[in-house]
Amino acid sequence: MSLNIEILEEKKNPLIERTEIKFSVNHFGAGTPNRLEIKKKIAAMQGSDEKLTIIKHLDTHFGASHTLGKAFIYDNKNELEYFEPFHIQARNLEKEKRTEIYKLKKRRENYKHLFEY
């Protein structure tokens, strides 16, 4: 599926060392696109590191063929780890890694090494 992403607003937040992006994705005739596909496309469009790009939220109304969303592109991993909650960081990973992280967290074992920043 070809993603047609339009950046609606882009703002630099120097205090947190991140770029905040509001975007719209047109996906006529298909379902809501995968969060990881959108993440890769936005990172490529902005020329940034995919690992430091976080899709904060996606909002699709029932029956609509477009999705509105917000993405954050961090300058370094320390800021990302500090400001983004655990569940948002985990949500931006592949399904296999996400399930492994949740299993390790449930058993109270170390899972930080599975986040690739």
Image (spheres, grey):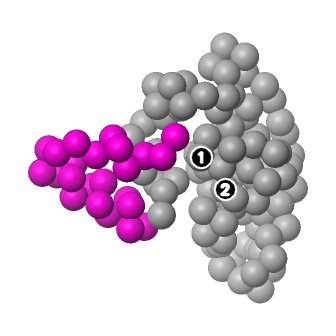
As shown in the figure, which amino acid type bears the numbered disc 1? Answer: Lys
> Which comes sooner in the sequence, label 1 or label 2?
2
Q: Locate residue 62: give its quadrant.
A: bottom right
Q: Is residue 81 visible?
A: yes
What residue appears at the point 32 percent right and 63 percent down from the top-left corner?
Answer: 99
Residue topped by disc 2? 39
Considering only vertical position in the picture, is 37 above or below 108?
below
Question: Which structural element holds mark 1?
Answer: helix
Q: Secondary structure at mark 2?
A: helix
Which quadrant of the figure contains the N terminus? bottom right
- Give the extent of the magenta segment: 95-117
Label at residue 102: none
74 horizontally vs 84: left or right: right
Q: Is residue 87 visible?
A: no
Q: Which residue is mark 1?
A: 51
Image spot of residue 100 (x, y percent): 29, 60
Where residue 16 sits, quadrant-wise, is: top right
Residue 111 drawn in magenta = yes
Q: Residue at x 42, y 46 (%)?
A: 115
